[in-house]
Each structure stands twice: as structure tokens, then as C-alpha cells.
Image (cartoon, helix red, strand yellow):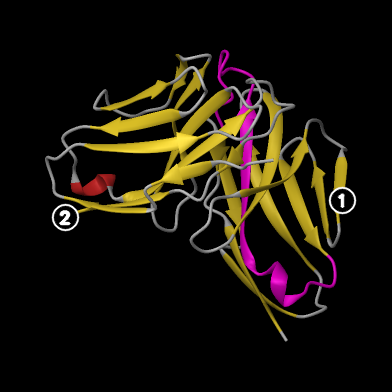
Amino acid sequence: EDQVTQSPEALRLQEGESSSLNCSYTVSGLRGLFWYRQDPGKGPEFLFTLYSAGEEKEKERLKATLTKKESFLHITAPKPEDSATYLCAVQPVNTGTASKLTFGTGTRLQVTL
Amino acid sequence: ETGVTQSPTHLIKTRGQQVTLRCSSQSGHNTVSWYQQALGQGPQFIFQYYREEENGRGNFPPRFSGLQFPNYSSELNVNALELDDSALYLCASSLGTGVGSPLHFGNGTRLTVT
């Protein structure tokens, strides 16, 4: 069974204090790994897709990396507006024609002044 | 570009009742997926519709059913509501089912079953 585990569950940073969020996954074959950001009361907002080990993607203060067992979301010099829950999801190869994602439970990030 | 819109935003129902949730997909997208997100959890896949046909289903009972219309909008129907059905129901649209077309989510319908 496909599994996604995210750590830590919650993280509190001061503005400017860089850190990383972890996503460990178990999947029979990886078609893609996704990062989403979710604000309270909103739907998830797409950030990145990673396809293969060694791949990296960047967007503003965020950088996502992928290995064969884990993905990291690095946040450099975060600002209060980066506060949100960050969700990791995998799309395995064996979902037939459907683009079914298996999500982790997320990391709640709070960035304070 | 119009994003994914869902209605209603909030709904309160009684156990045993039936509910219909609606979703308009993002302009140009032909695939709609539905997810259930319980409080403090990640979204769980319910099913996906592509060109008006269900083309994948998660571990949900048959009382969860859906439709996709020719304009690619979609409905999620839940019969015989149970207390555990209380959750945020998310609709996501994409262009096709390939991994190169990521899911774009709406803001969900918050369903409370009492």
C-alpha cells in the first residue's frame, strides 16, 4: 500500500530562520511527487511536481528536492506569509488511467516576526 | 482564467439524509477528481471523472457516487449520510490524467453531519 509520512507535524520559525520539511514515501513505482500549500479554510494550492531522484524545483523562497525515498521542501528566509500547511502527495504508477494522489497529513508551518 | 469553484461552501445535514455537492472545473480542464479531507488529515481520493466516465475510484462505499457533465462540471452525491462523512470535500480539475497536468483544487464544501 502506498504511504506518505510528513515530518514534523508542526513547525514554528522566526522570520528569516531557514528550515526543511520532510516527506517520506513508500510506493511501488513513482510517477510523480507533488507539493501543495493549504491555507486555513482553502483548498490546496499547487507548488511543484518532481518526477525522478535528483530533481530540484525552486519558487521564490521554496526549493523542493527528491530522492528515491524522500522529498524535502527547503524554506529559505521565511516570511509570515509563508505560514500554511504544506502537503506532500505521490502519484504511483499503478493507478491505471486515473491520476490518483496519496497525500500525507501535512506540516503546519507558522512563521513569526 | 476561471479557477475551480464549488458550491455550497458549507452544509449541515442529518444522519441518513442525502447530499449533492457541485463543482465547476477550471477553464480548459476536462478531468475532475473528488477528495475527502477530514480535520487534521490529508485529502483522500474518492473518484475521478474523465470525459463523463468514472475512470478511477478510491476506497469509498457505493453510496458515494458522481457525475460529470458535457461542460466538464461535476457533482458528488452521498446517500445515507453517516457522522463520519463530516469533512471538507474538495474538487480538483486537470487537463487529462497524466502526471504532467497537476490537480488544481477548489476551496471545498464543508459538510457537517449531525
- Packing grade of label 2 (10 A; few <14, some 14-19, many >=20) is some
- Packing grade of label 1 (10 A; few <14, some 14-19, many >=20) is few
Observer able to see residue A26 = no
A19 relative to B12, above or below: below
Q: Which mark is residue B114?
A: 2
Q: Label 1: which residue?
A: A58
Residue at x-position 33% and y-position 29% = B60
Viewed as shown, does residue B65 lie left or right of B57?
A: left
Q: Which residues are magenta?
A: A76-101
Q: Which mark is residue B51?
A: none
- Does the magenta-highlighted stretch encompass residue A99? yes
For badge 2, the amino acid type reads Thr
Residue at x-position 44% and y-position 20% = B69
For badge 1, the amino acid type reads Glu
For mark 2, name the chain. B
Q: Position of residue A64 (x, y in %)?
A: 80, 49
Residue at x-position 76% and y-position 35% = A68
For mark 1, name the chain. A
- Real-space CA distance between mark 1 and mark 2, rounded to the nearest whole angstrom: 44 Å
Q: Position of residue B75 (x, y in %)?
A: 38, 30
Q: Are marks 1 and 2 on the same chain?
A: no
- Does the magenta-highlighted stretch encompass residue B2? no
